[in-house]
Image (spheres, rainbow, N blue to C red):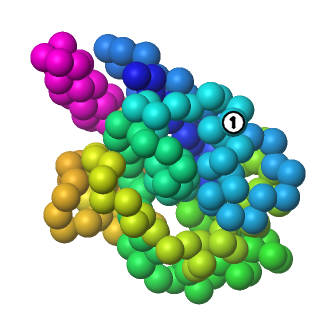
């Protein structure tokens, strides 16, 4: 069983640097693949599976868009679990205004992703410079078409910021960090790492009992 984690849209694996130092096990923090025209989350998921050799019984997770694509990876195999950090199970969970703004990314994709993450975050702003604007545009424009998670056979673990204005915090079914916003993997790295450590211990104990 291996762990793989995807970043948020417009970000890369560096967003997990602080979190990674607090982990008690290994996670493969991966970047978005080179964009060659994929228009759907499932197409991106297929490419990630191929590039990283993700197999059945692995655990895949991610932040924001990364969590959404993790759910699409689960559709294409038999993952042991999916872990969402400030992410969504369905399009309706994403802030309504963002769905309305998504078509505008054909004009201003980088401005849109800055709106998603907050211009005041220096770490994220630096990542914007390396983000492929065509990838950002395509992923934003697909959001209104995303059907959401339909596979109830895969366990899903969720941790969410209580003050997330991009993907508002679900009322049930997740661990809540009361004072965190959308970038909780960065702003509350310790709490996120503790949550991931707890999940890993749970599966290690289960495996030892088999």
Q: Position of residue 204 (x, y in %)?
A: 23, 19
Whether residue 77 is situated above or below residue 147 in the rendered picture: above
Magenta-colored stretch includes residue 198: yes
In the picture, measured across the screen, residue 36 lies left or right of residue 18, that is: right
Q: Nearer the viewer, residue 127 or 69?
A: 69
Q: Position of residue 2 (x, y in %)?
A: 45, 23
Whether residue 179 is situated above or below residue 59 in the rendered picture: below
Q: Can I make out residue 120 in this image?
A: no
Residue at the (86%, 51%) spot, across then down: 36
Q: Please give the range of residues in magenta.
A: 190-210
Residue at the (13%, 17%) spot, across then down: 209
Q: Quadrant of residue 101?
A: bottom right
Q: Position of residue 16 (x, y in %)?
A: 50, 31
In the picture, measured across the screen, residue 64 lies left or right of residue 10, that is: left
Residue at the (63%, 58%) spot, across then down: 42
Magenta-colored stretch includes residue 91: no
Q: Position of residue 187 (x, y in %)?
A: 40, 40
Whether residue 203 is situated above or below residue 168 in the rendered picture: above
Whether residue 17 is situated above or below residue 138 in the rendered picture: above
Q: Which residue is mark 1?
A: 50
Furthest residue in direction right, as rendered: 36
Furthest residue in direction front, as rendered: 210
In the picture, measured across the screen, residue 82 lies left or right of residue 16, that is: left
Q: Nearer the viewer, residue 162 or 174?
A: 174
Screen quadrant of the N terminus: top left
Residue at the (36%, 15%) spot, across then down: 25
Screen quadrant of the C terminus: top left
**Marker count (numbered):** 1
Looking at the rendered structure, the secondary structure element under dot 1 is helix
Q: Quadrant of residue 49?
A: top right
Q: Which secondary structure dominates the residues rendered in magenta?
A: helix
């Amino acid at each position: 069983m291996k762990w793989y984690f995807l970043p948020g849209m417009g970000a890369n694996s560096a967003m997990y640097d602080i979190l990674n130092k607090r982990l008690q096990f290994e996670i493969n923090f991966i970047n978005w693949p080179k964009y060659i025209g994929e228009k759907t989350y499932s197409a991106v998921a297929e490419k990630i599976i191929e590039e990283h050799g993700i197999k059945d019984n692995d655990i895949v997770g991610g932040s924001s868009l990364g969590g959404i694509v993790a759910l699409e990876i689960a559709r294409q195999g038999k993952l042991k679990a999916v872990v969402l950090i400030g992410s969504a199970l369905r399009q309706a969970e994403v802030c309504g205004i963002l769905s309305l703004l998504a078509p505008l990314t054909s004009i201003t994709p980088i401005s849109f992703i800055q709106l998603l993450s907050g211009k005041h975050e220096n770490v994220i702003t630096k990542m914007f410079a390396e983000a492929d604007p065509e990838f950002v545009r395509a992923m934003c424009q697909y959001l209104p078409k995303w059907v959401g998670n339909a596979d109830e056979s895969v366990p899903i673990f969720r941790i969410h910021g209580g003050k997330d204005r991009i993907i508002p915090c679900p009322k049930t079914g997740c661990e809540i960090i009361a004072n965190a916003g959308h970038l909780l993997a960065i702003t509350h790295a310790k709490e996120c790492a503790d949550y991931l450590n707890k999940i890993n211990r749970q599966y290690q104990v289960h495996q030892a009992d088999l």
